[in-house]
Amino acid sequence: MEDVLDNLEEKIEYAFKDRSLLLRALTHSSYANECRVEQEDYEQLEFLGDSIIGFVVSENLLVNHPDLTEGQLSKLRAQLVSSSSLFRSASGLELGRFLRLGKGEEKNSGRRKQAVLVDATEALVAAVYLDGGMDAARRFVLQQLAEDLGDILSGRFVLSDYKSRLQERLHSLREARPEYSVIDQSGPDHQRQFSVRLTIGGKPTARGQGGTKKSAEQDAARRALKKMGPITC
Ligand code: MN
């Protein structure tokens, strides 16, 4: 186990003073129960880690994006602390390899479950915090979310991703994929306006405008979603 832990510490670029904290962050409740060892599982750490990630992300967004409104900051934070961002981080660390699971959970492919991996990532953040303090925890969180945070800075991260929402909606309705084409560009270079047509299964559905091709596509997707009305279950 020691070698394995060395390996994980290298990946997270943090060496624990108290390795029992690291072990706890890797211990699923099924292991603690089945193996009847005096070992606490990661659930309480996860509770703390969730707050730490929210705090670090809020702080970072506020410093780097003083121009955004509270509503926009909240939306961005929600996306950054979402399971999909944390799952990417867990996958990057190959965290599944390091988990301690009970037999049942092992058979249940627990090592590959998104929910388990996300929870363990949150627990790991809390373990780093308890062992090394806020600076160490902040470094770890920012390192894990670096890609997403960079996308926000470069404007590649759209506040509300209507294109993805439309795609998901159409997929659930078993409809064709949306297609976007630029039908017009006007204005001088520094103030260009793009017009985009959105077709679904060849049928023109909506048009959108924006200062970039991407924002015009988002605008078209937003209008198409509006036309489709609210989601009913
Ligand atoms: Mn959780």
Image (tube, rainbow, N blue to C red):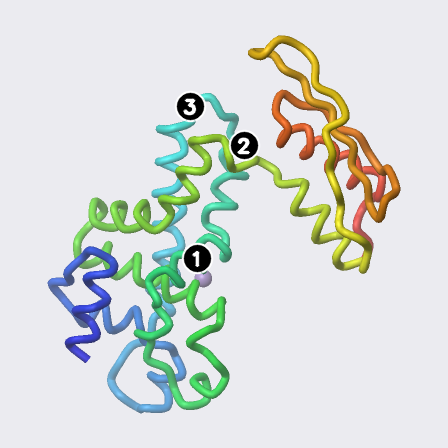
Name the amino acid type tagged 1.
Arg
Q: In the rendered view, tell whether residue 213 sits above or below residue 165.
A: above
Which residue corresponds to mark 3?
66
Q: Earlier in the sequence, mark 1 or mark 3?
A: 3
- The amino acid pointed to by label 2 is Gln
Mark 1, residue position: 88
Whether the residues at callouts 1 and 2 have beta carbons within 8 Å, the answer is no
* CA neighbours of label 2 inside 10 A, class few (<14), some (14 to 19), many (20+): some
Work out whether 31 lies above or below 112.
below
Residue nearest the viewer, comparing 202 with 160: 202
Foreground residue, 150 or 24?
150
Name which residue type carries label 3: Pro
Q: CA distance from mark 1 to mark 3?
A: 27 Å
Mark 1: few, some, or many residues within 10 Å (few <14, many ≥20)?
Answer: some
- Label 2 sits on residue: 72
Q: Please report the residue visible at 34 percent of the width from the left and 70 percent of the height from the top.
A: 42
Quadrant assignment for the C terminus: bottom right
Mark 1 or mark 2: which is in front?
A: 1
Q: CA distance from mark 1 to mark 2?
A: 23 Å
x, y percent for residue 18? 14, 66
Hey, which residue is sitting farthest left in the picture?
A: 17
Location of the N terminus by quadrant is bottom left
Quarter residue 120 falls in: bottom left
Q: Where is 112 relative to 55, above or below?
A: below
Direction from residue 206 to residue 154 in the image, left or right:
left
| Residue 91 image point, x, y percent | 40, 63
Q: Secondary structure at mark 3?
A: loop
